[in-house]
Image (cartoon, helix red, strand yellow):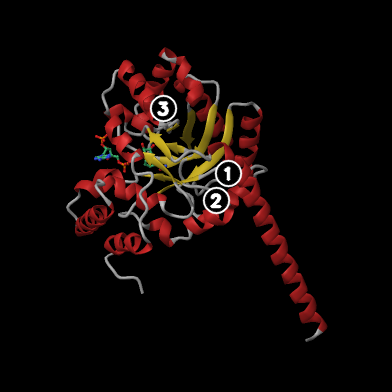
Amino acid sequence: MSERSMSERSMSERSMSERSMSERSMSERSKSAQAKWRDTEFVQGYWRLADWGMSTRQLIDFIEAHIDLGITTVDHADIYGDYRCEALFGEAMQQAPHLRNQLKLVTKCGIALVSTNYPDRIVNHYNTTPEHIRQSVENSLRLLSTDHIDLLLIHRPDHLMDADAVAEAFNAIQKSGKVGQFGVSNFTPMQYDLLQSRLDTPLHTNQIEINPLSLGVFQDGSLEHLQLHGVRPMAWSPLAGGRILHEQSTQAQRVRATLATVAHELGDFSLSQMVYAWIRQLPVNPMVVIGSGKTARIAEALASKDIQLSPEQWYRIWVAATGTNVP
Ligand SMILES: NC(=O)c1ccc[n+]([C@@H]2O[C@H](COP(=O)([O-])OP(=O)(O)OC[C@H]3O[C@@H](n4cnc5c(N)ncnc54)[C@H](OP(=O)(O)O)[C@@H]3O)[C@@H](O)[C@H]2O)c1
């Protein structure tokens, strides 16, 4: 072997080993940052809060009920309910301030919706400028009636995102104590790595859609990428917004039929419980974001915790979801 190709090889070996060391140390730092969330298996989503028609008293009862069941992380976004959900939740926090310390509050920013609240906007768009992030944090703190957000996510990837500028904004906000940790949502592995490369602390999660009717994250490397970095995703719309249970498409009908057969083999479980188990069995250990506003359905979700599918049962649901046998 020539001297040149030997030195090229040793350079490439060194860069591979440096890369794998930096991947390892990133994964180790992620793990320690994630320790605080280790017990989080389910998260209560509040996207649909404005549709639930709850009085503040009913909302307080609902929050207390899911805390009692063991769900202490709640998922919000500035835009939910046309910018109303955070304020509704904040009313409950004001009237029952003892609940705040029992909860980890997640919220998101970065989407700018056309809304009566923002009459000058012409089109829905994304905005991840430091100014928008800072302003959004201030709004969320005020509306949620709290002095800190436990986890702030950039809601959607933004073609105009300047990763250095976002990192600077994150650092300043974290120093102020207004946000504990940061993460992203709906980011591809490359978009995730780009932002992570500019940050001193690990991103906490990528909140992504995972359910048998929406298989994108199985195809774009997202799950492997998160497993590589020791980062747990939050799985949004685990029941595809309820479509798994009622949609009349052939895919949904196939999935329901298979879920029912496997549920019968494993015991007396509901279709939704089987879906939660199917998602939670992924080795990347997703935290499942529940969307129901009904305490009984949340209890039902939690009762799926110990369901264990065999690899073949898992793949029967996969085959029903994709409509084809694995190669
Ligand atoms: N990051 C993002 O881009 C993003 C996008 C979407 C959602 N999210 C988050 O993910 C959360 C969950 O999403 P999702 O609401 O679409 O979740 P989901 O669990 O897929 O769907 C919940 C919907 O299904 C209905 N449903 C019908 N039967 C049900 C049953 N047996 N058990 C549970 N629900 C049943 C619920 O109605 P009832 O209330 O009547 O039970 C509710 O309308 C949201 O609240 C939000 O926090 C994030």
In the drawing, does residue 298 fall left or right of residue 174?
A: left
Q: Earlier in the sequence, mark 3 or mark 2?
A: 3
x then y, percent, for residue 11: 76, 70
- In the image, taking residue 151 as reference, residue 269 lies left or right, namely left
Relative depth, front residue between 267 and 163: 267
Check whether the beta carbons of the residues at disc 1 and disc 3 lie within 8 A of each other: no
Q: Residue 213, can we see it?
A: yes
> Is 268 above or below relative to 4?
above
Please name the amino acid that badge 3 sits on. Answer: Ile
The residue beneath circle 1 is 203
Image quarter in which the C terminus is found: bottom left
> Crowdedness of circle 1 by 10 Å Cα count: few (<14), some, many (20+)?
many
Percent across and percent down for residue 236 are 39, 44
Q: Which residue is mark 2?
A: 192
Do callouts 2 and 1 mark residues in contact (Cβ within 8 Å)? yes
Instruction: Look at 41% across and 27% down and name the residue there.
Output: 67
Looking at the image, which residue is at 42% across and 62% down?
219
Name the quarter where the N terminus is drawn: bottom right
- The CA span between labels 2 and 1 is 8 Å
* Pick the front one: 282 or 289: 282
| Ligand 1 rendered quadrant | top left
